[in-house]
Amino acid sequence: MSRLRFGLIGTGFIGRTHAIALNASGAVFGERFAPVCEMLADHTEEAARRGATALGFARGTGDWRELVADPAVDVVDICTPNYLHREMALAAIAAGKHVYCEKPLANTAQEAAAIAAAADAAGVRHMVGFNYICNPLLHLAREMIASGELGEVYAFRGSYLEDYMSDPASPWSWRCDRSLAGSGALADLGSHLINLAHFLLGGIARAQGSLQTVHAQRRDPASGAARAVENEDIARALIEFASGIPGTFEISRVATGRKCGLDFTVFGTRGALEFGQERMNELRWYEAAARAGREGFRTILAGPIHPDYRAFCPAPGHGLGYNDLKTIEVRNVVRTITSGAAGWPDFHEGARVQRVMESIERSHAERAWTEVAP
Ligand SMILES: NC(=O)c1ccc[n+]([C@@H]2O[C@H](COP(=O)([O-])OP(=O)(O)OC[C@H]3O[C@@H](n4cnc5c(N)ncnc54)[C@H](O)[C@@H]3O)[C@@H](O)[C@H]2O)c1
């Protein structure tokens, strides 16, 4: 089978991460997972040309529609701000291209479901960039939960805390605008946490949420004028999985001091698991059966015995990084497309995540528990 040719749109924070992963996938996972970096699009011709040269792409264009229509592009890889995902994904699907899109898939659950349905109808493969669940240790955590090592799981506690907007002087950006970003911390960070919770424990059935905007106005960097922040800085929620397991979420973009605080604890009758993305090569495991006086969490270090680690490094404890998670994700995208097997997290999962976000928002407005729409 010939190598898949990727067209990347956007070269900001996550676009560069995708480019690094596209270039690394073949070296890490072997020739059959090596995509061709065919074309790159950015907001101007100049930025696209510069980006293409710097990031190893054959060609660049200032017009993303040209990339979508190009017959030499098999997969459209969308790394632009949230408000562009829908239009770009639908155009790519209409052109018969496979689509790999950053999170959140769209700005509303309805839009996300429509994109998923269009992709299925066109028979193209689709995947959302929920990279954190590619961590080998999270696969171990899931296996330990599923195999019953924790006993009966009775609670989940998850948070995603960052401080990229904790300074009141941080400028207004598209992330503060409802029509451009959708919700605030919930869409940007909460989408990852919800996907992670789904990955470990299955679907979320209901939620009771509470939203808080700490800084109601921010300075527009273009005009210098104060502009309203239209979405939340912090989201909190009580949740209940379809299995009946209860849990809590805390999500913040103003969590002073926290940089990538995607953390969780899963509590079971025979043990507990703890993880934090800032120490992403460590999974902490508490076994309730330990001898009296010897109890305590112990740290499992990531190593070649865990899925995908060996492809990067033969020695345990040396550690993977954030960009390596994207490389694993790119391998998954290539594998899904070339094998024809269903991949996950696909656009349906993108829509499911969006429905949980919306139920948290709705429950804040109604001050009541809300069911996650089926
Ligand atoms: N998976 C993750 O861990 C992760 C991390 C960061 C961002 N993201 C997601 O990635 C997306 C982009 O976020 P970012 O932080 O990289 O943003 P960014 O502002 O750093 O980069 C956006 C890029 O899109 C380009 N762009 C904007 N409009 C365009 C247009 N009309 N045509 C072509 N290119 C255009 C910009 O020039 C820029 O290169 C968001 O949806 C965000 O939620 C995901």
Image (cartoon, grey):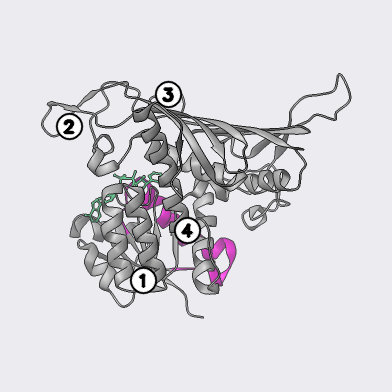
Residue 41's tag is: none
Look at discs 4 and 3 and give the one toward the viewer.
4
Q: Earlier in the sequence, mark 2 or mark 4?
A: 2
- Nearest the viewer among 302 and 343 is 343
Residue 70 on the magenta span? no
Three-letter code for the amino acid on which mark 1 is drawn: Lys
Would you say the beta carbon of the disc 2 residue lies within 8 angstroms of ligand 1?
Answer: no
Q: Which residues are magenta?
A: 9-35
Badge 1 marks a residue whose secondary structure is loop
Residue 97's tag is: 1
Rendered location of residue 24, percent (x, y): 50, 59
Q: Is residue 359 above or below residue 4?
A: above
- Residue on which disc 2 sits: 221
Q: Quadrant of residue 293?
A: top right
Give neighbour class at mark 1: few <14, some 14-19, many 20+ (Cα, 10 Å).
many
Residue 255's tag is: 3
- Residue on which disc 4 sits: 346
Rendered location of residue 114, percent (x, y): 34, 59
Rendered location of residue 359, percent (x, y): 41, 38
Q: Earlier in the sequence, mark 4 or mark 1?
A: 1
Q: Earlier in the sequence, mark 4 or mark 3?
A: 3
